[in-house]
Image: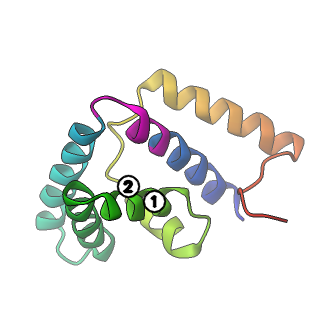
């Protein structure tokens, strides 16, 4: 996995954790959906944003939709990497949380101890 893709996966893991454990996770999903709707209307050719709108609507309406969204955030597969390149979740992590994730990622990447979570 390329470095930038690995970094986006670590950020996806942190976003998942916050969405999954936060008391206001539903509100964070709504904010992400509203952002994706707004930007997909401005850029209708962006297929990733259109898919985010669909996935976020599903996540807001069912547990299965949420679980599918969480699976995407945690996936090392190419489609998930592509989706994370247009992530609607920039508001979820605070600057401090984001910096903590990125510093931990950098340390693991440099040591060669970073892993994508798949079984060896």
**Label tally:** 2
Query: Residue 93 in magenta?
Result: no
Asked if the magenta segment contains residue 18, the reply would be: yes
Label 1 CA crowd tier, 10 Å (few <14, some 14–19, many 20+): many
> Residue 116, position in %: x, y?
71, 57
Query: On the picture, is 119 further left or further right than 25?
Result: right
Whether residue 107 is visible to the viewer of this picture, yes or no, is yes
- Identify which residue, 68 or 38, lies in the foreground: 68
In terms of secondary structure, where does tag 1 sit? helix
| Neighbourhood count class around disc 2 (C-alpha, 10 Å): few under 14, some 14–19, many 20 upward | some
Q: Which residue is mark 2?
A: 87
Marks 1 & 2, CB-CB < 8 Å contact:
yes
Q: Quadrant of residue 51?
A: bottom left
**Hey, which quadrant is residue 94 in on the image?**
top left
Looking at the image, is 102 positioned above or below residue 63? above
Magenta part of the chain:
16-24
Residue drawn at 60 percent across, 26 percent down = 100
Colour scheme of the rendered structure: rainbow
Residue name at image x 43 percent, y 66 percent: 83
x, y percent for residue 8 = 55, 52
Q: Secondary structure at mark 2?
A: loop
Quadrant containing the N terminus in the rendered view: bottom right
Residue pictured at 24% horizontal, 64% vertical: 58
Q: Quadrant of residue 40?
A: bottom left
Q: Main secondary structure of the magenta part?
A: helix
The quadrant the C terminus occupies is: bottom right
Residue at mark 1: 84
């Amino acid at each position: 996995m390329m470095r930038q893709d690995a970094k986006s996966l670590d950020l996806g893991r942190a976003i998942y954790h916050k969405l999954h454990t936060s008391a206001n996770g539903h509100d964070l999903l709504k904010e992400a959906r509203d952002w994706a709707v707004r930007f997909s209307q401005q850029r209708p050719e962006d297929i990733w944003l259109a898919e985010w709108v669909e996935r976020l609507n599903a996540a807001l309406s069912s547990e299965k939709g949420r679980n599918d969204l969480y699976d995407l955030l945690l996936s090392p597969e190419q489609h998930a990497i592509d989706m994370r390149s247009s992530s609607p979740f920039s508001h979820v992590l605070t600057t401090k949380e984001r910096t903590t994730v990125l510093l931990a990622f950098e340390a693991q990447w440099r040591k060669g101890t970073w892993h994508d979570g798949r079984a060896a």
